[in-house]
Amino acid sequence: RSLLFALLATLLLVGGARAETDPDYSMVLLTENFPPYNMAINGKNFAQEDNIDGIAVDIVREMFKRAGIKYSLTLRFPWDRIYKLALEKPGYGVFVTARLAEREDKFKWVGPIGPDDWVLLAKGDSPITLGSLDEAKKYRIGAYKGDAIA
């Protein structure tokens, strides 16, 4: 009985334990226009705080509210600029970003928020058909600089 009581008491005490953060601690969270996950309400490539909306934005706001951590939100372009800031500056983070093997040890990951299906597109009247990704190498393919898909 005493062992059972000790185990239950320990579980109750551990259940109430939580890490404390400095009440002045604040994070700077950076993102880009990537609808429907995150986007500037006005459609521009720069926005802050309440001018940013999207599925991921709602999740991030709720997570930080529950954790009791102060934060600021900024949406800007280009992606490689905000990615570099998150890597170099303490207290900075990025969301939404693709989780790739070469990025794994560079961040503390939270998620996933949703799927990230990558596709190749051509004009509707294009005769191009592909049976594999290797077959696409003979075509000119565009992506924006610094993006995981590039």
Image (tube, rainbow, N blue to C red):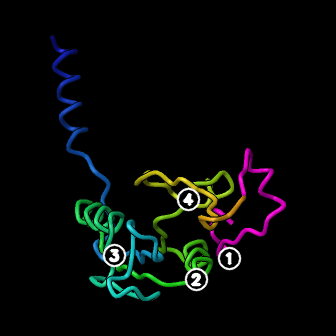
Residue on which disc 4 sits: 98
* In the depicted structure, whether residue 9 falls above or below residue 56: above
Q: Nearer the viewer, mark 1 or mark 3?
A: 1
Of the two numbered discs 1 and 4 in the rendering, the one whose residue sits closer to the viewer: 1
Type of amino acid at the residue the image marks with label 2 = Pro
Q: Residue at x 63, y 69 (%)?
A: 147
Q: Do labels 1 and 2 touch, CB within 8 Å?
A: yes
Place residue 102 in its image quadrant: bottom right
For label 2, the SS is: loop
Measured Cα–Cα span from mark 4 to mark 2? 16 Å
- Which label belongs to residue 71? 3
Q: Quadrant of residue 53?
A: bottom left
Alpha-carbon span between mark 1 and mark 2: 8 Å
Q: Which residues are magenta?
A: 128-150
Residue under numbered circle 2 = 78
Where residue 23 appears, as percent x and y from the top left, is 28, 72
Q: Is residue 25 magenta?
A: no
Marks 2 and 3 close (CB-CB < 8 Å): no
Does the magenta-highlighted stretch encompass residue 140? yes
Q: Which residue is label 1 attached to?
A: 145
Disc with the residue nearer the chain's start (1 vs 4): 4
Which residue: 55% across, 59% down? 98
**Count of picture labels:** 4
